[in-house]
Image (spheres, rainbow, N blue to C red):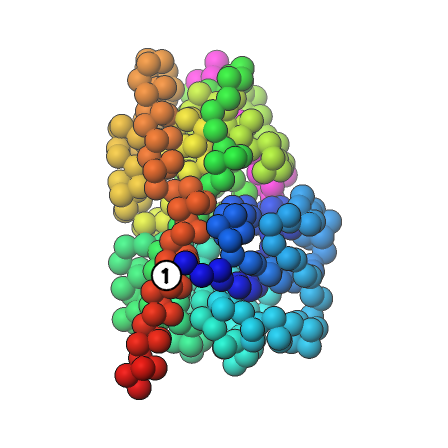
Amino acid sequence: MKSWNITILGLSITSSWGNGHATTFRALIKQLQQQGHRVHFLERDVPWYASNSDMPAPPYCKLDLYSTLEELKRNYESVVAEADMVIVGSYVPEGVEVGKWVQQSAQGIKAFYDIDTPVTLAKLKREDYEYLHPYLIPGYDLYLSFTGGPTLDRLEEVFSSPSAKPLYCSFDTDLYYPEDTPVLYDLGYLGTYSPDRQPSLEKLMIDAAQAWPEGRFAVVGPQYPETIQWPANVAHTHHLPPSKHRQFYNTQRFTMNITRADMIQAGYSPSVRLFEAAACGVPIISDYWDGLDTVFSFDEEILVSYEAADTLRYLKEMDEHTRKEIGEKSRQRVLKEHTSVQRAKQLIGYAEELKAKKEITTING
């Protein structure tokens, strides 16, 4: 297999503050580099990431920051033109103009990596073209989607994507694994505040905490309104860097997964938190969405909650042997299917397949 020269224009790799993009890019790019490929990451230099940078110099790729679209075009046209594959990520600032420029400049494979597919499609439906316009989709050779299932057909049939493929998030096995550590919480939740996610958090976790004062709960994540009154048995931490996520998961008996409304509607949209928690062997209590059972088997690898009573039943009635067994089965599942090693190979596999098709087309031309 050849060594690929890949350029990625992403939201952020330097800062995980308030976004899941950075950890996704870090895990993927680290493995691409270890598998012999070269990656050049281009990131817009913005104040809120610059002031909350937890990886200012990634060791497994070349990183350049740019301040304006004009600077990007002026300084990095050759980088884009000479790459074997150029990937533009979702939520890149001025993403539509960036995408137009990439499609005009790149000579290799042009891909869009949508780490927010259901959100993107909801925005397109509202004619909100913050970072992607429908007219750009046919110009990307490959649409890499965080969402699988019927959404892939929609991208090809409705939006005329030449090739829509799933590229779920993944986890780094060097960073996420079980540890023998004191258990501090019966149930924890890790996630940035989102208005559409908050009702489910309150219904499935906060209500359970209020109904069980003896229980120990924790919520970690930024941007929660100061007006929220957390119950006395719910500890809230504003931010936890990725370097401490493993420790947080391992201090929980169970961990909570709450899914954004757009992703529930689309289905088939596993979050990176699912894989990271499972990798630590912590049993997950999740809200329901279509396709969840294609990622984990219900009651064997994941627990589904529809109301606080379900959450409390798991927390208070499940014996320790069953709890640990569910955590271990989910861990084995993600080790088999969702590591960054596998995801990097999947990406290169898509690229190799597309390259071969282009070469056949040229020969038959």
Q: Which residues are magenta?
A: 212-226
**Quarter of the rendering containing residue 164:** bottom left
180 and 262: which is toward the camera = 180
Residue at image coords 54%, 51%: 33
According to the picture, the residue beneath numbered tag 1 turns out to be 350
Q: Position of residue 72 (x, y in %)?
A: 66, 71
120 and 329: which is toward the camera = 329
Q: Is residue 213 magenta?
A: yes
User: Against 117, is 364 above or below?
Assistant: below
**Quarter of the rendering containing residue 259:** top left
Q: Position of residue 15 (x, y in %)?
A: 64, 48
Q: Classify the position of the N terminus by image quarter.
A: bottom left
Residue at image coords 45%, 61%: 2
Q: Amino acid at mark 1?
A: Tyr
Residue at image coords 31%, 41%: 295
Q: Classify the position of the C terminus by image quarter.
A: bottom left
User: 108 left or right of 352?
Assistant: right
- For residue 327, say whether it is visible: yes
